[in-house]
Amino acid sequence: MMRPIYVVNNFGQFNHLIHRALRDLEIEVELVPNSTSREQVAEGCRGIILGGGPAIERAGNCSQYLDLGLPVLGICLGLHIIAKKFNGDVNPGRSGGYGPVEVEICNHDNILAGYPGKVSVWASHADEVSQLPDGFTLLARSSICNNEAIAFLDKQIYGLQWHPEVSHTFEGKRVFENFNRICLENIG
């Protein structure tokens, strides 16, 4: 049996929707707490999605999962965990709470393959990546946030400010299909 993708629960209100979105796409998936040991994650899955949540202080072991050589997709808080781990800056955003944002896709490879040049997404900008970490590539930006999506392409680590799992986001499932493809290619 193929190892699942782990969705790491960071106490966010949408973590169960990420899990359900993958299940609906018939992708093997398991929702795990962020207290799961680094070793269990390394042995148990083929890719990791770091879900959203209220505070980086409650992110448990998430930053340890970024050293495992597995593909990682960080969503909202997950993106912030990635940026902090690689010495980027995360600061309060100017625009605050949840709402619609028009995002310009700058790089259509990998995680954003198949998207048009501009998409309407649903995002919270309470916090956002203000300084791209070294080694990272900008994938998408908006008029309110310079770093809507970023990637460390060599390590297959991707981060999105927006929530692909909510219905208000344009074709969010495509992100999960792309991530699943990346995970499968990584196996071999």
Image: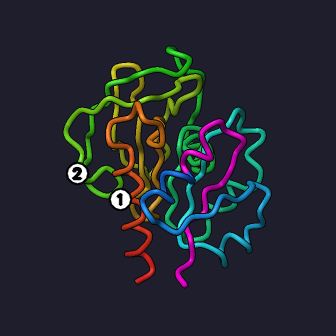
Q: Position of residue 75 (x, y in %)?
A: 53, 44
The answer to whether residue 88 is above or below residue 110 is: above
Specify few, some or many for label 2: CA neighbours under 10 Å numbering under 14, 14-19, or 20 or more. few
Q: Give, as a single range, the part of the protein colored magenta.
A: 1-18
Q: Residue at x 79, y 57 (%)?
A: 35
Give the residue pinned by disc 1.
178
Please state the total of marks drawn on the protein image. 2
The quarter of the picture where residue 91 lies is top right
The kind of secondary structure element at disc 2 is loop
Determine if the magenta segment contains residue 63.
no
Q: Which mark is residue 114?
A: 2
Q: Residue at x 54, y 49 (%)?
A: 18
Q: Report the side of 152 relative to 12 (left or right).
A: left
Alpha carbon distance from label 2 to label 1: 9 Å
Q: Position of residue 13 (x, y in %)?
A: 65, 36
Q: Mark 2 near mark 1, Cβ–Cβ under 8 Å?
A: yes
Amino acid type at mark 2 = Gly
Q: Nearer the viewer, residue 129 or 118?
A: 118
Q: Residue at x 36, y 54 (%)?
A: 111
Q: Position of residue 171 (x, y in %)?
A: 32, 42
Q: Residue at x 40, y 84 (%)?
A: 188
Q: Nearer the viewer, residue 129 or 168?
A: 168
The kind of secondary structure element at disc 1 is helix
The quadrant in which the N terminus is found is: bottom right
The quarter of the picture where residue 67 lies is bottom right
Q: Earlier in the sequence, mark 2 or mark 1?
A: 2
Q: Position of residue 102 (x, y in %)?
A: 32, 25
Q: Nearer the viewer, residue 153 or 142?
A: 142
Amino acid type at mark 1 = Asn
Q: Which mark is residue 104?
A: none
